[in-house]
Each structure stands twice: as structure tokens, then as C-alpha cells.
Image (spheres, rainbow, N blue to C red):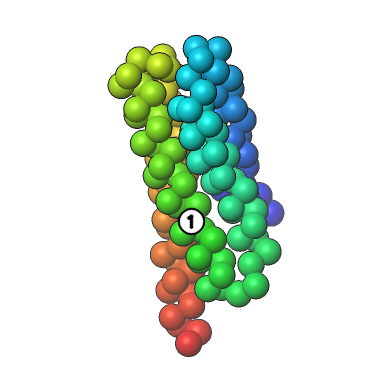
Amino acid sequence: MKEPLKIKSYEFSILIVGCCDTLQLKREYILSKQLLKSGTAICALYREAQYAESRADFIHKLAIAQKECNETIYWLELCRDSGKVDQEHSTCLIFKATELLKIITSIIRSSKKKLNTNN
């Protein structure tokens, strides 16, 4: 069974690492660190959620991934609007992050419905 979120979030992490390398070349170490932490946490949290102890734990871990994804969009917008990252590249990353955010939000909603149905 394919796992679109697992694949997309991992590919996104790789793109974030590349973007952060570019920021570090420009000596933008703080922006790079913040973006790297939030941008790679999305996939890490999803993978952690796959081994959640309960449905509620799964939802909680995905909710944190959702927050990290939203934070990543903020850092990418800041990089774009301050001219630290190429407009086209940052816009593409923002689009991909927004797509991840929509997927995560959808999974959280459906998981909450299942949790409420079972209780």
C-alpha cells in the first residue's frame, strides 16, 4: 500500500535540506536552522504517528506535524519576501507545504470522526 503523505513529506524534507544549504551559503544561519527544524519535522512526526499507542496519540502527533507544516510555510514566506530565497523556488516549496498541510488536516479530521464514532 502506498503512503502518499510518507512519500511527499520525505521528498519535501529533501527539498528543505537543499534550500537550507542555499541559505547557509548566504550566511543565513538562523533562518536556515528554523526552516530545517520545522520543514523536516513534518515527515519525522508522521513516521512517529505511524507507531502511535492509540488513535488519540496518532491524532496528537499529526496535530504537531500540522503546526510544524504551518510554521514551515511562515519561514518560506519570510525567506521569499525578504529575498533570501529565489521567488520561484520558494513559491514552489510553499505550494508543496500547503499541499502537505491539506493532507495532514484531512487525515486528522477523518481520524477524529473515527475516534468519536468508536467512543
Q: Is residue 8 visible?
A: no
Q: Quadrant of residue 48?
A: bottom right
Foreground residue among 35 and 88: 35
Question: Residue at image x 46%, y 47%?
Answer: 68
Q: Secondary structure at mark 1?
A: helix
Foreground residue among 4 and 24: 24
Question: Residue at image x 55%, y 12%?
Answer: 25
Q: Which residue is mark 1?
A: 64
Q: Is residue 67 visible?
A: yes
| Number of residues whose C-alpha sits closer than 10 Å to that of mark 1, classed few (under 14), some (14–19) or many (20 or more) | some
**Residue 8 in the image, given as x and y percentages of width and height:** 57, 40
**Residue 63 in the image, given as x and y percentages of width and height:** 46, 59
Question: Residue at image x 44%, y 38%?
Answer: 72
Residue 95's place in the image compared with 82, above or below, is: below
Question: Residue at image x 56%, y 45%?
Answer: 41
**Residue 83 in the image, given as x and y percentages of width and height:** 35, 15
Residue 72's place in the image compared with 115, above or below, is: above
Which quadrant would the N terminus be assigned to in this image?
Answer: bottom right
Q: Which residue is most to the left?
A: 81
Amino acid at the residue labelled 1:
Ile
Q: Quadrant of residue 89?
A: top left
